[in-house]
Amino acid sequence: MNKNSQVIAKIKPKIRIIHIFAPEVIKTDVKNFRSLVQSLTGKPAAGEAKTGKRRARPRIPTSQEPVSGDHQPVNRLSGFTGLLANGGNHQVKEEWGSGDQSTSNTNTYFDLEGLIQDVGEDYFSSFPMRSSSSSQVEGFIFDNNNNNNNFDTKDHFAHHTQQIIFAFFSSRSPSSSRISGYKFWRMVFFRSVSALSRLRSRVGQQSSLSNSVRWIQMQSSTDLDLKSQLQELIPEQQDRLKKLKSEHGKVQLGNITVDMVIGGMRGMTGLLWETSLLDPEEGIRFRGLSIPECQKVLPAAQSGGEPLPEGLLWLLLTGKVPSKEQVEALSKDLANRAAVPDYVYNAIDALPSTAHPMTQFASGVMALQVQSEFQKAYESGIHKSKFWEPTYEDSLNLIARVPVVAAYVYRRMYKNGNSIPSDKSLDYGANFSHMLGFDDEKMKELMRLYITIHSDHEGGNVSAHTGHLVGSALSDPYLSFAAALNGLAGPLHGLANQEVLLWIKSVVEECGENISKEQLKEYVWKTLNSGKVVPGYGHGVLRKTDPRYECQREFALKHLPDDPLFQLVSKLYEVVPPVLTELGKVKNPWPNVDAHSGVLLNHYGLTEARYYTVLFGVSRSLGICSQLIWDRALGLALERPKSVTMDWLDAFCKKASSA
């Protein structure tokens, strides 16, 4: 036996973990990660092992403190930017054996970095997972504009890391025999190191980590009530906004040019919108998460399926990725709120059945306003600090009821008025598909994807800005959203998805389904030379292919690769951008979200193009209503920008040029 070996067969290891405080997440940066691991695992600093002195535990940043953004390429574990789940404010008491029989060494020291270099990364093919009991788990996603390099923080880093750090504290020896006990503890140790090593290898494949680490919060299922989550978040965000205004209120965000004033305020920063942010190159991010990332981390109805819209709603409102249990609870809450009064249907029926679907839909939403909780509370004298509460109730009621109203409009116009009742056992997207009359599972998946990706696109677009503008006057969510729908109905906004399918069908009618690329190019030029635009191409902000287009294309490649219209859309993707680039007048020649959605809906039988904007409106309720809640919670001011005349511009510009 080696002189340094220790006998462990005479005792039965017994571990007791005592959490003095509720466990929290520990965040660390590049400089402190190694020392943090050492402190949690018991490794001494250099020169301390012989003296028996322990290094003082490094200071751990709280969850409110920012993490260092100075990330460097990772080639060693000591350069690994990470987090430790279940770390935080707790103490651990270890008991190995009892009384005088205890002969084992409780101070288990090891060279973590050195062992990683020696252990093969594929030494173990699997690693046992242990569920987390913490109130939340945080993780990070690496993104160098390459979605294939992203990995799911829920399934990889957070769980692996907590297992690595607590492997010794949460395992039990399967045998009291000398050999099996030794092998078991060695297995636990090496599996822990091997798992972290594999993560290190994946990070090492990234070309650069500079400005590419984003922290996300993964919620547990301990609190299923969305409103209570907001009650906890709102005071913190109110303080944050006050601090931002007091410390940086006079900071300039840019210059305003005449082009901006007369060009639709393009590129002008002038609106606070918390739920999403649109980058010209990256596309939309919902609370910091791209569409591919949402598809990975948000709960789905089926394994590997599209995210549930309820999960995105939770994310938009809280900034946190919900658990499956939280999504299910929210889905039930929405289902229980979905009852629509008869007078709403009567209001719609008062219109001709030939009225545009958006006219009927917006009229139904206006009729829902009769039951506004905000209006009742305001008239009863509610304090402004509580405005967000009735706004929340109105918003959740509205989100729950718009699919019912929208489905009624569809069945009234196209199915002889034969309505289909709601099915409370289905999730939000699947139930909407069911009420429309489409029970194909793939159509339900498409509806989940459609609602998710159309839900929000920051605050500057017509519908979102209109909802915010009207809401800033303290109009209730029904009035605000109805106004937003009227903006969405415009041909330059939400009506474009209708125009795309009609244009594609006109191509087929004139040239046939098997049109060549050269013929298609001629048809595109014919459209442009007639003074029209190619619908579905270009965007006011984006300067690349819309990620919402890309995820719909992936859906089509997976589920309907041989569909003739999809193949035509694929040819257009190759033909149109070069033509628009040659034209020289288009800043963004790439397809947007509208270029693809109609083809998918048409494939599954929803062929009525005039109705497509209503689907867009149902989706947009999630984003607009989420932001309206935060508008009231943060006490955002009445929107009142300054306008000028051409005479004023002439005078100002002459004065500026002569100065």
Image: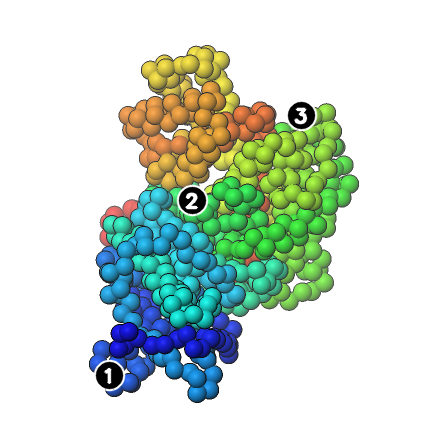
Q: Residues within 10 Å of mark 3 (few under 14, many from 20)?
A: few
Q: Which mark is residue 369?
A: none
What colouring style does the render use? rainbow
Q: Residue at x 38, y 17 (%)?
A: 520
Residue type highlighted by circle 2 = Pro
Where residue 106 sits: x, y (%)?
38, 79
Question: Can you identify the residue that label 3 sits on?
Answer: 414
When the figure is inspected, residue 545 is found, relative to residue 307, above or below; the finding is: above
246 w.r.t. 159: above or below = below
Question: Quick one: label 1 or label 3, which is nearer the N terminus?
Answer: 1
Q: Nearer the viewer, mark 1 or mark 3?
A: 1
Q: In the image, which disc is placed on residue 292?
A: 2
* Label ID, residue 50: 1
Quarter of image, res 554: top left
- Quarter placement of the N terminus: bottom left
Q: Gap between marks 1 and 2, in whole Å?
A: 51 Å
Q: In x, y percent, where is residue 160?
A: 40, 59
Q: Using a 10 Å C-alpha cutoff, classify the residue at mark 2 as few (fewer than 14 neighbours), some (14 to 19) or many (20 or more).
A: some
Q: Nearer the viewer, residue 388 or 448?
A: 448
Circle 1 or circle 2, nearest the eye:
1
| Three-letter residue code for mark 3 | Tyr
The reply to whether residue 614 is in sight is no
Dot placed on the residue nearer the N-terminal end, 2 or 3:
2
Question: CA gap, disc 2 to disc 3?
Answer: 35 Å
